Image (spheres, rainbow, N blue to C red):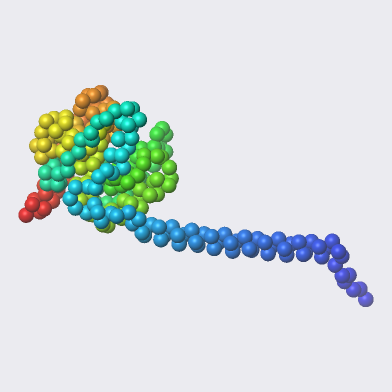
Amino acid sequence: MRFCSAPGPKTARFAYNALVASGRALRAVVVAAVLASLLLAGGALWWLSPGRGIGAWRQGPPPRPWAAWRRQETVWREQGLRRPIESRYVPLPAISIDLQLALLVSEDINFLGHGAFDFAAIREAIGEKERGGGRFRGASTITQQLARTLFLSNERTLWRKLREARLAWWMERRLGKRRILELYLNVVEFGPGVLGAEAASRHYYGVAAAAVDASQAAGLVAAIPSPGRDNPDTSTPRWHARQALILRRMEHASWLRRLLVALDRSERD
């Protein structure tokens, strides 16, 4: 009759070590799961809290100074310059339809139809990057740009983009499309220290924002991507090319013009 021998010391030690290792692995998994849950809960709580007094921006002139205003003052101070910021608030009905249209066809043609983010534009930008390489084309909505202009720095970091996305999400819910468009046109930079459509219209063309024609509107909006370098005063080839492109887009966006006119009339009635 044969009997199984008892496991030797080496076998027992191996089994013990395996048991200890599995226990440690299990503890690591549990700790990781708890941490992940805490991070998700904290992230959700952070996202669902506005964090800033967005309510203060619901109507009337935007509170001064906003982030872009302070950045320009800092630049001038570092250069030893003492210059006033040019800015004059006007309500949206006092900004020409041509200027509203020029902005939308240039910066965010689907602004009135999407939420805080334009996922179609994001997919298109990713596709262009994959097909042609080179620099990644931006797909920020007007709401995202406004969040950055009012509250954030220009640093290219993931944290800044997350804060921008969260603010844009809340601004869409608290302010609405018309107010966002009005704020954007009153705070966006059209040149060094030239903030907002009214100040820019008077600075470059000597007319009020309500009187800007299609060519002037395209010229103003053509300055937005690089206002310090390409604007109606510098009249660079890049600025002229942008102005011509925006004019062509305006001609092909009669549907959007009609929508803007209808919204303007409904607000005046």
Image check: 164 left or right of 65?
right
Image check: 226 left or right of 268?
right
Residue 58 makes an appearance in the image = yes
> In the picture, which quadrant includes the C terminus?
bottom left
Depicted 249 relative to depicted 62: above or below:
above
Q: Nearer the viewer, residue 103 or 64?
A: 64
Q: Nearer the viewer, residue 177 or 64?
A: 64
Horizontal and vertical percent position of residue 192 = 26, 31
Horizontal and vertical percent position of residue 157 = 43, 42
Q: Nearer the viewer, residue 159 or 261?
A: 159
Q: Please tell me in which quadrant of the rendered image residue 216 appears.
A: top left
Q: Please tell me in which quadrant of the rendered image residue 158 appears.
A: top left
Residue 245 makes an appearance in the image = no
Residue at x 40%, y 39% (from the top left corner): 155
Image check: 188 left or right of 216?
right
Depicted 233 relative to depicted 246: above or below:
above
Residue at x 23%, y 35% (from the top left corner): 85
Q: Residue furthest right?
A: 1
> In the picture, which quadrant includes the N terminus?
bottom right
Horizontal and vertical percent position of residue 59 = 19, 53
Q: Residue furthest left?
A: 269
Horizontal and vertical percent position of residue 81 = 29, 28
Residue at x 11%, y 30% (from the top left corner): 206
Residue at x 76%, y 61% (from the top left corner): 17
